[in-house]
Amino acid sequence: MAEKFETPVLGDPTERPMPVLIPGATADLKSYVAAPAHNEALGFPAQLVEDWKPKAIGLMGDLLSRYRSLQVFMDICVKCGACTDKCHYFIGTGDPKNMPVARQDLFRSIYRRYFTPAGKLVPGLVGAKELTRETLDEWFNYFHQCSQCRRCSVFCPYGIDTAEVSMAAREMLDQLGYGQKYCNEIIGKVHKIGNNLGLPPAALADTIEGLEEDIEAETGCAVKLPIDVEGAEVLLVTPSADFFAEPHVLGLIGYAKVFHQAGISWTLSTKASEAGNFGMFIGNYAQMKKIATRIHEAARELKVKRIVFGECGHAWRVAYSFLNTLVGPWDFLDPRYPVPQHILEVTNGLIANGGIKLDRSGNDNMVLAFHDSCNVARGARMGDRPGGQFVIPREVIKASVPKLVEMCPDTTHEKTFCCGGGGGLLTDELLEIRVKGAKPRMEALKQVVDSQGVTHMASLCAICKAQFTKILPYYGYDREMVVSVHQLVSNAIIMGNND
Amino acid sequence: MAYTVGGKTVEADEEGYLVNINEWNEELAALIAKDENVNMSPEHWEVVNFLREYYAEYQIAPAVRVLTKAIGKKMGPEKGSNKYLYELFPYGPAKQACKIAGLPKPTGCV
């Protein structure tokens, strides 16, 4: 497959210029539209309904009444421009509609026309626009060129969150029968098979058996990856990519070694064999709840005391921020532990109390950078202190590797850039925008590679790992440069009797 | 889209993955490979055949690690690596090899 686009030239991340505007640069970069079967499996109309216009206006009114935030975001923008150059897709493509304010305005202009007095009376004066068939196409394009990473909201003086606007737009499109194939096909697989990948129980068991053999061959220790074990203390819920892809699986091996060495009984679940919750990406509360319900059911059926989430960015946002509202209460779990807990909190605690021991020489010659994943950085927290989601992963990495260096501060912590593939964009037909959207992260990475000898970049999100594996070669780097955080733990952990 | 092979039309999705895996045959695989700029060697066929065998048993393509291990066993340890599979299938062994083998595309965060 010959590429039809050019990979951006990397510059200095500390002096990033305002991109040159290229109107319409990504106007033709379109996700595949969901097929009738994908839509119907989720209870959405098979294809674009005939009465889409009144239905769309009705849906918008409903969302505005249900989500106060959306209503505020529609009214409060003063066009100050603070967000314009903060989106990685705008930086990478120069398409002005990828400026966060312009993306919001695709929604806001319709809102004004049908829901504000001025927009009804003098639409031309207040940026109000008629809803047309073309509007829906433009929405489909540009709301699937937003990875819902929320970086723009950090810089907005009013805290307007473009992610919520994009979720609302996607929800409306789905309800009109105009959904995106990538997200809807995957959610269908979760309902039918149990995970995003479509990995049936027998294949999961076979894969896990192979991993147990590999770990024993490598370490001499019979480390188990138990599945559906009733009465285990911990239910581990992890993205199904951890069973399938590289470097994800190396992280999964790391979790298993940690539990083994700490003597914590744990289990995976075939029913909850997926941490990810794409219901959030499509802004559909009912889907998000249905997907989360599997985890609640699995925890009850397996009679576990704790639930722990593996390395997955948006899964952690849904888990940390919404799980209790969606499918709580969790009063049957052990109250001494957070509900839910992140695997990094578990590992960090064990490092601190001596429950596991690490030897940095297991990662000899590696110099690490750490990519903060957007949904962890800006949508959740870890530990019991503000900023724990930044501190805890770094503490674990520092305990595992000889050297960790920080990338340009404009690209880390709460200002981190999306990998370029989040929010339902990790699909091949969007490769161009994925490569271009990775530009700011690649600039920051290149800087520390050139100046501080960084050899690898760690991530704690399945999407980030898959995205970087794919796009690193476009920027001249090896795909294996991206590693799982628990891959580093796995390399460093001292196995066997540590007494 | 669709492929035409042996005078027969075989339906595929937008990206060229077969709609019905039972319509796959070696001639069709060679045609898909040509579209992908993959020159099928005996090593490529080993991978494709393994994918199909695994799929027949488990209704899913094997995990990358399962595949590399199986290829290492069949073709020698030096070939049982992700790097070697990328040499054979530059767009990525999971997706490109599945397409040629007539299997559905692996979905999710992969």
Image (tube, coloured by chain):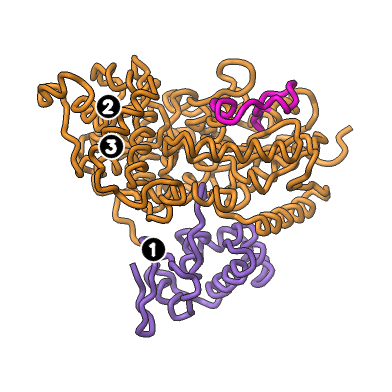
Q: Tell me residue A104's x, y (percent).
A: 28, 29
Tell me the number on the disc at residue A56: 3
Quadrant where the N terminus of chain A is found in the figure: bottom left
Color of chain A here?
A: orange
Q: CA distance from mark 2 to mark 1?
A: 35 Å
Which quadrant of the figure has residue A151? top left
Q: Dot 2, how many residues are within 10 Å of its Cα: few (below 14), some (14-19), or many (20+)?
A: many
**Amino acid beneath label 2:** Val
Residue that numbered label 1 is attached to: B13
Please identify, in this view, whether the residue under mark 2 or under mark 1 is nearer the observer. 1
Considering depth in this image, is A440 or A151 the residue closer to the camera?
A: A151
Q: Spatial distance from mark 3 to mark 2, Cα to Cα? A: 22 Å
Q: In the rendered image, which residue does mark 2 sit on?
A: A101
> Of helix, strand and loop, which one carries label 1?
loop
Residue A459 visible, this orientation: no
A397 vs A21, left or right, is right
Residue situated in front as seen by the camera: A22 or A456: A22
Which residues, given as a range, are shown in magenta? A321-345
Q: Position of residue A324 (x, y in %)?
A: 59, 26
The part of the image, by quadrant, that contains residue A118 is: top left
- In magenta segment, residue A339: yes
Q: Is-magenta flag for residue A187?
A: no
Task: Tell me what hue chain B is rendered in.
Answer: purple
* The furthest residue to the bottom: B6
**Residue at x-position 59% and y-position 31%:** A327
Q: Chain of mark 2?
A: A
Labels 1 and 3 touching (C-beta < 8 A): no
Apparent side of residue A488 relative to residue A44 in the rendered image (left or right)? right
On screen, A214 above or below B20?
above
